[in-house]
Amino acid sequence: MLKFFASTLSSHAALAPHFTARPASIPMHENACKCTVLAKREFSPPHLNTRQSAPPRTKARQRAPSPANSISAKRTHPPKWQSLLLLSLLSLLFLLPQRAPAQNEPTKPNLILILCDDLGYGDLASYGNTTIKSPNLDRLATEGIRFTDFYAAGIQCTPSRAGLLTGRYPVRFRLTYSLMTNTPTGIPDSETLLPQLLQKQGYATMLAGKWHLGDQPQHHPLKHGFDHFQGLLRGHDTDPREFWNDNRIIEKQAPIETLTQRYTTAATDFIAAQSRKKQPFFLMLAHTAPHTPLTTTYAQAVEEIDASIGQLRAALKQANLEDNTLIFFSSDNGPAVGKEGGVTGPLRAGKFSTYEGGIRVPAIAWFPAKFKPRIESRPAILLDLFPTFLNIAGAKPQTTKPIDGKDLTPLLFENKPREGADFFFYAQDRLEAHRSANWKLKLPDRQTAPPELYDLEKDPAESKDVAKEHPDIVKRLQQQMADEQKALTSQGG
Ligand SMILES: [Ca+2]
C-alpha cells in the first residue's frame, strides 16, 4: 500500500515532479513597487497593494503656466465681488459630505482558511499519494506555495484549533485535550481570537464547519469573533450531532454524509454575499472529514473535500475575487492510523503522537496575484497564521500576552526566512518534542527512557535515533526545552 513512500522525504521534488520550475504568472515584485504610498497607509506588508497605483499629482501642479495663467498672475487685486464668490464656494465645500471610497480603491485581501480534520501528510497526490484523486488540491498546490515541513499546533482537535486561533501554545491557557460533550471547559474569555481582531479591521467573519472549542453558551463562536456560524460545536462523532445556523440549532441529528457539502454551500453563499457588500472577509472552512466515523471510504471523504475546493474556487471566480483572496489549506493534526484512517507517507506514527506523523501536515498557501508558486521546505506551524493573517489585514496582535506564532508574510510574499527556527510540540500538557533546524529531540513515551534525537533532513521517518552520536546536540536541545518551559511558567500563560 505504501509502496510510493519508499523514497525518502528529503527529496520532495521527487514526490511531486510537476512542481518544479513552473514560472510565476505574475512577477511578485511588479505591483509592489508601484504603490508604496498606499501600501503603507492601508497595510503593514508593503507587498500587499492590489488594485491601483498612487494617485496622480494634480494637473495644476504638473501643468506649465499658460499665457492666460500668466495674465491672471499679473493682476494685483481681484474685484471684491469675486472674493466674496470664492469665499461662498469654499464654505459650500466644507458643508459637503466626505466622499465615498472610489470603486477602484485598494481592498484588503480576503482570507480563507480551510482546515481538514485528521488529514494525513500522505493523503494528497501533491504529497505523494497515488490512489486518492485530488485534482483541485493538486492545482491549488501547483499554483501556490506547498509546504513540506508544516506543523499542526497540537496532536488532536481542540488544542490545535485553540493554538491556530490564538497564535499561542494552548498549554498557556490549559486547553490541551479534545473536549467532550457538555463539558464546562472551552476557549476562555481571556483569550483574543483571530476573528475578533479581524472584525476590528472591518472584516466580516464566518466559521463554516467544526468549532470544537466549547459547547457551552459562553464558548459559542459568535461570542468569540465570528459574525456567522454554520456547522457543529463539537466533533461529528458525538451524540447528538446538532447543526447550528448562527445561534440556533436547525437540525438535531445532521447526517454525516451531508456535512462536507453543507459547509461548502454555507461558505460559497457567504463569499457571494460578501462580494455584493464589497467588504473583506475571513472565512474559516473547518471540515469534519476525513475524521471518523465516515459513511464513505476514506478516499471518497478526501475526494469530497477536493470537490469542495473546486466549488470554492468557482465561487471566487464568479464573484471576481480570485485576485484579492488568499487561501490557506491544512489539517489540524495527523491521521488516525488503521483500517479507516489515512496515511502519513514516510512519517512515523499518527494522530496523538509527537512523532512526525502526528504533527506534520499538508499545507498549501495560495494567492496567485502575490505568491510565486514554489515548494517551501523551511518549517512553519499553524500558530504562525495568527500574526500572518493579522499583518495581511493591516493589524497587530493587540495583546499583551506572548504570541508563539511568527509572522509568515516575509516568507510568503518575499521568500525570506521565517523568524526563529525552534518549534515545540506538546502531548496534552507535556512538552514532548522540539525541532531546531534539522534536529529533533523527542522524549519517549516511557518517561524513564533517554531522549531520542533525529536528523529530519536525512531521516524524516525518524527511524534512526542518533542521540548517542551527538550528545552535544542532545544537551543543547534539552536545555532549550527546559528554557521554554521555564519561560512559559514565568509568563503565567
Ligand atoms: Ca483532528
Image (cartoon, rainbow, N blue to C red):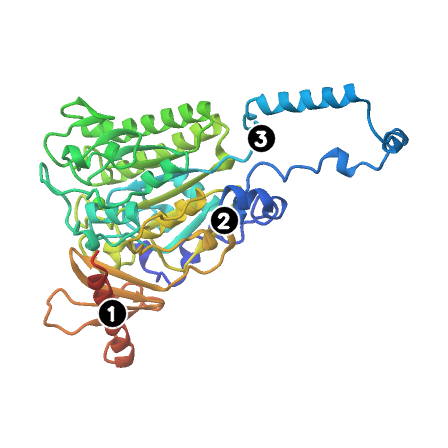
Q: Ligand 1 within 8 A of label 3's CB? A: no
Q: Which residue is mark 2?
A: 45
Q: Position of residue 363 (x, y in %)?
A: 36, 49
Q: Which residue is nearer to you in this view: 227 or 161? A: 227
Q: Which residue is nearer to you in this view: 482 or 425? A: 482
The answer to whether residue 242 is above or below residue 461 is above
Could you say which quadrant of the image residue 315 lies in? top left
Left or right side of 375 for 348: left
The answer to whether residue 151 is above or below residue 282 is below
Q: Position of residue 187 (x, y in %)?
A: 20, 43
Q: Which one is earlier in the sequence, the residue at label 1 or at label 2?
A: 2
Instruction: Identify residue type, mark 2.
Output: Pro
Q: At numbered mark 2, what does the secondary structure look like: helix, strand or loop?
A: loop
Q: Which residue is nearer to you in this view: 7 or 54? A: 54
Q: Which residue is mark 1?
A: 483
Q: At numbered mark 1, what does the secondary structure look like: helix, strand or loop?
A: helix
For image coordinates 10% across by 37% down, the residue present is 181
Q: Which residue is nearer to you in this view: 226 or 336? A: 226
